[in-house]
Amino acid sequence: KNQVEQSPQSLIILEGKNCTLQCNYTVSPFSNLRWYKQDTGRGPVSLTIMTFSENTKSNGRYTATLDADTKQSSLHITASQLSDSASYICVLREGAGKSTFGDGTTLTVKP
Amino acid sequence: SQTIHQWPATLVQPVGSPLSLECTVEGTSNPNLYWYRQAAGRGLQLLFYSVGIGQISSEVPQNLSASRPQDRQFILSSKKLLLSDSGFYLCAWTVGGYNEQFFGPGTRLTVL
């Protein structure tokens, strides 16, 4: 069982709508939790990074939350745009050389 | 500013052929460097990481190897490719062990 589970696996929404992606984890302890956006055929690009003591972090239309009690994180996208179509990856960093990646949620924004 | 380069961008190789993928980082010193592989629709799998020249840690036993001949150069190699080596290979770097990780553009490898 993956220690970082993301849901849903894929999601289709209409342009302008909001959506929330989920990340449940069992990794403990960890130093930070990151959300990445990966366009098809490209390397992941960081959206947010939160330490275990932070609850929320925003980056423009992207807002990440972290609940250490329930071991859940979410990424909320507001007013979606066509360019938001990508895979979104949740990553927990445990140590200097160790990160655990979720399998990602594939988001498709349709006009 | 820091940038990370990978080449080639795409590669098609026959089974049993050798492999050499290169990654270089600009604008930083003594970075931690990483090689990941990503299968279609799956998360990233850490293959190797390096905290300094000549220092390589392997996460997954396989027919791949890595080398770091210079501070900002990281090379992924194989003597004989397998079909299962096909995938999207990503190089990444951080400064320090816990900081944000930056990824390169990736290399799409297809082994036929």
Image (spheres, rainbow, N blue to C red):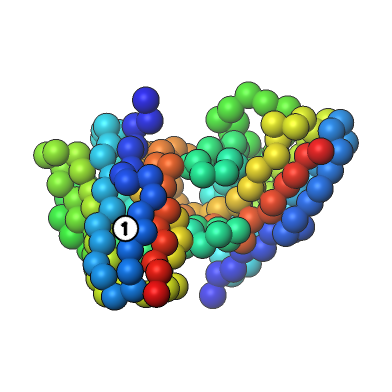
In the rendered image, the vertical position of residue B88 relative to residue A109, given as above or below: above
Q: Is residue A79 visible?
A: yes
Q: Secondary structure at mark 1?
A: strand
Q: Residue at x 35, y 54 (%)?
A: A11
Number of numbered tags placed on the structure image: 1
Locate the N terminus of chain A and report the quarter of the image it occupies.
Answer: top left
The residue at 33%/69% (across/down) is A14
Tell me the subunit letter for badge 1.
A
Residue A45, position as x, y percentages in the image: 46, 62
Q: Which residue is mark 1?
A: A49
Q: Which amino acid does the dot numbered 1 rest on?
A: Ile
Q: Residue B57 sits in which quadrant?
A: top right
Near mark 1 (Cα within 10 A), the count class, few <14, some 14-19 or many ≥20, is: many
| Quadrant the C terminus of chain A occupies | bottom left
* Image height of B66 relative to A45, above or below: above
Identify the residue at image location x=72%, y=59%: B9
Give the percent coordinates (x, y) of residue B41. Answer: 51, 44
Q: Is residue A96 visible?
A: no
Estimate the x, y position of residue A48 in percent, counting from the top left. Answer: 32, 61
Question: Residue at the left extreme?
Answer: A69
Q: Nearer the viewer, residue B79 or A15?
A: A15
B25 or A12: nearer the eye?
A: A12
